[in-house]
Image (tube, helix red, strand yellow):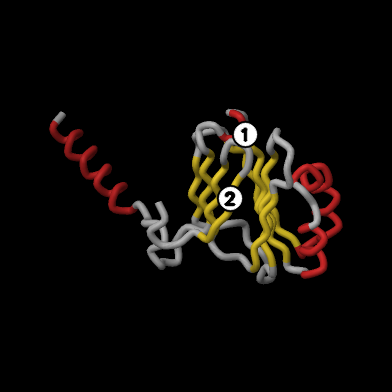
Amino acid sequence: MKRLAIILSLTLAGCAAAAPTPGAGRADAPVLRIVAEPDANGRRPVAVDVVRVADPALAGRLAGLDAAGWFRDREALSAEAGNRIAIASWEMVPGQSVLLHSLPPFATPPTQTLVYARYGAPGVHRHTLDGAGALDVRLGRDSFTVAPLTEGTP
């Protein structure tokens, strides 16, 4: 029994020591955090797409779409865009959060990143950012925010 307690404590200590610190400047620093507030989307799941685009003309076209248009047409747009676009998708439930240290590989550096969130409330529900820096996405009751994910961001 004592042996089991020692093994368990060493295992837990090792797990705690290996946990990465957000924004620590290491190669495994977080690149995306999504936090769904407890009342996000009126307490209903929120579909979130992070779209990285390597073509300025395509980025301009996508920036003209609201979230409803994006989610309606994303299959066709993705097929048409080929390797000029990379899409990462989640279905977030209220109160849930994710912290990612990588996104799917993308062949060329993105010129723009767009974030779409499918809300029940009317609105554009799209944010557009230059490049592909680390993102902090906060899903609220009727809308969301996107900001750079910086060192020390809680």
The vertical placement of 132 against 120, above or below, is below
- Which amino acid is tagged 1? Asn
- Which amino acid is tagged 2? Thr
The residue sitting at 68% across, 59% down in the picture is: 128
Location of the N terminus (image quadrant): top left
**Crowding near pointer 1: few (<14 within 10 Å), some, many (20+)?**
many
**Crowding near pointer 2: few (<14 within 10 Å), some, many (20+)?**
few
**Mark number, residue 92:** none
Say whether residue 97 is left or right of residue 48.
Answer: left
What is the secondary structure assignment of the residue under circle 1? helix
The residue sitting at 62% across, 34% down in the picture is: 41
Q: Residue 107's image quarter?
A: bottom right
What is the secondary structure assignment of the residue under circle 2? strand
Residue 26, given in percent of the width and then of the height, sits at 41, 66
Q: Name the residue under label 2.
A: 145
User: Along the polypeptide, which appears first: circle 1 or circle 2?
Assistant: 1
Say whether residue 18 is left or right of residue 121.
Answer: left
Residue 104, given in percent of the width and then of the height, sits at 62, 57
Q: Mark 1 points at which residue?
A: 41
Label 1 to label 2: alpha-carbon separation: 13 Å
Q: Residue 150's image quarter?
A: bottom left
